Amino acid sequence: MIRTPLRPLARILEARARGESPAAIERENLRLRHEQMRDAARDRAEGRLLMLGVMFFAAFLVVGVRMGSLAASEPSEPRAATSGAAIVAQRADIVDRNGNILATNLATHSLYAQPPNMIEPLRVARELVAIFPDLDEEKLVRDFTGKRKFLWIKKKISPEQMQRVHDIGDPGLMFGPREMRLYPNGPLAAHVLGGSGFGREGVSSAEVVGRAGVEKAFDSWLRDPANGGAPLRLSLDLSVQAAVERVLAGGMKLMNAKGAAAVLMDVQTGEVIALVSLPDFDPNERPRPLVKGDASDSPLFNRAVQGVYELGSTFKTFTIAQALDEGIVSPATMIDTKGPLVWGRHRIRDFHNYGPQLSVTDVLVESSNIGTARIAQRIGAERQRAFLEKLGLLEPTPLEIVEAASGKPLLPQNWSEISTMTISYGHGLSASPLHLAAAYATIANGGTRVRPTILAGPVAPGDRVISESTSRAVRSMLRQVVSRGTATFADVEGYAVGGKTGTADKPKPTGGYYKDKVIGTFASIFPADDPAYVLVVSLDEPEDRTGSEPRRTAGWTAAPVAGEIIRRAAPLLGLRPEIETAAGFGVTLAAN
């Protein structure tokens, strides 16, 4: 601003010349200067007030928007900052072949404490024990009043429990978000799913990892964000699985068995439709493994996959199938069954005396150990071993659960002639019920190798093991075993069941065999003329006590249980019963 002189010389000289006072000019100029200064100060003040008003308006606008967003959001607890790699908690669902949920995720919370922030630790400990009775009040008091700055109280709590903890109202109690694994069907298919637990944990998230079964076998896949949340689809049918479990549990109780297993498999693809091992467990509350004693006593033990047993006379089917396929015998070939069959110090006997000879068909139908052993002698050890290897009976099954690798068959150290003879009727070689189901599927489907799978989807055909004509002949024999042989209690009207019983003495841990404990097994196919499914049922130490004397053979124990399973499951599988019309029944066209 250019300042005007208060006493300009030109105006002073003019004023003196006119006789005026120069002081009036100075006063006027001073007044004008003060007015200019006042106007400038007012303009500055007005600008500052305007800017302050804009700033206050912007601040109130920000606060209002933030308050609105908080009011519209879900309430959450403060989260402590964590370092290190982020924890991936999201895990894909597991569904059955029809899309029914077998395993999914549930949003929940964990409860932890920060004792330095607690106001009333004694009251908090008392009220927490009222909510969670399994907690120790004295230990909580020690932790809350000691030097600890952080401790977990509960890894998973329900919404109701969370609200009750909220009502305690102490700032030292904190909640962390959790994603827990939920198995909505409880124990159903427990040994297939396996279960899960927490891996790496933080206060704001936890890593869910598989512990067993498909949860562990597909752990990386289930946690991979690249899959876009797509579920893992299994070959199981939930409704069929439930029916098989229910009937098998009832049969196990009726037959006074220690344990039981069942495998239902598609004969063409090897897809496992149902897989049951009893006793079972709830994967939502997976029990701890046994640290001592027999592993098979634990409910975690998968008898269908991990349990390797001598499966008895069910192996006779393989011996006869090989002999037929290699042209060694025909169904009508007569076999010497006079007993006992003596080989060195060993004596092979039959359960009953079947006379001096039986046809090959009747060797299977009547379940003659002597007849089967004589057929095996004609086959020889080398060819027998090669055939069983083609059936997959000499190696662990490729089923996609982690326990499958531990189900390794037990083979004789020296595959001698006597081993060949005993293995022919199911003694001297131990395999799992799953091995047996896959081998029977191979025999029944026309002779192509079946590899069991727990995943739904297309399966490439396997190598040929036996001819289609041999498969048809064996299916006919298996049907006769049920219709007139050792497995008549497995016959189901309308479904033409075929199968073979097997009763094997149970080995002692110290060597030798029990005289009054057996493994009873029934391997079946249905319908026998054009098989769609294989069912294997195995009972551990069964005993039918309805008669005057205990009956332990598979024909009395495993066979009727399998028959009831087929009766319940076949309609669920979409199989229509074949109803035979009575003689003379028909429709006659009457002419007008």
Image (cartoon, helix red, strand yellow):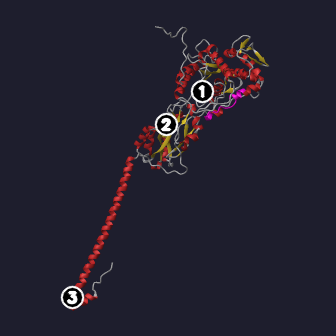
Residue 313, disc:
none
Q: Residues within 10 Å of mark 1 (few under 14, many from 20)?
A: many
Which amino acid does the dot numbered 3 rest on? Answer: Ser
* The residue stretch that appears in magenta: 387-403
Q: Residue at x 54, y 18 (%)?
A: 577
Which amino acid does the dot numbered 2 rest on? Answer: Asp
Relative to 98, residue 318 above or below: above
Residue 114 is situated, as x and y percent measured from the top left of the image, at 47, 48
Disc 1 target residue: 265
Disc 3 target residue: 21
Residue 366 is situated, as x and y percent measured from the top left of the image, at 67, 14
Q: Residues within 10 Å of mark 3 (few under 14, many from 20)?
A: few
Q: Is residue 13 left or right of residue 154?
A: left
Determine if the magenta segment contains residue 388.
yes
For marks 3 and 1 on the same chain, the one whose residue lies earlier in the sequence:
3
What whole-number distance in Å separates the C-alpha atoms at marks 1 and 2? 44 Å
Residue 456 is situated, as x and y percent measured from the top left of the image, at 57, 33
Residue 572 appearing in the image: yes
Q: Element type at marker 2?
A: loop
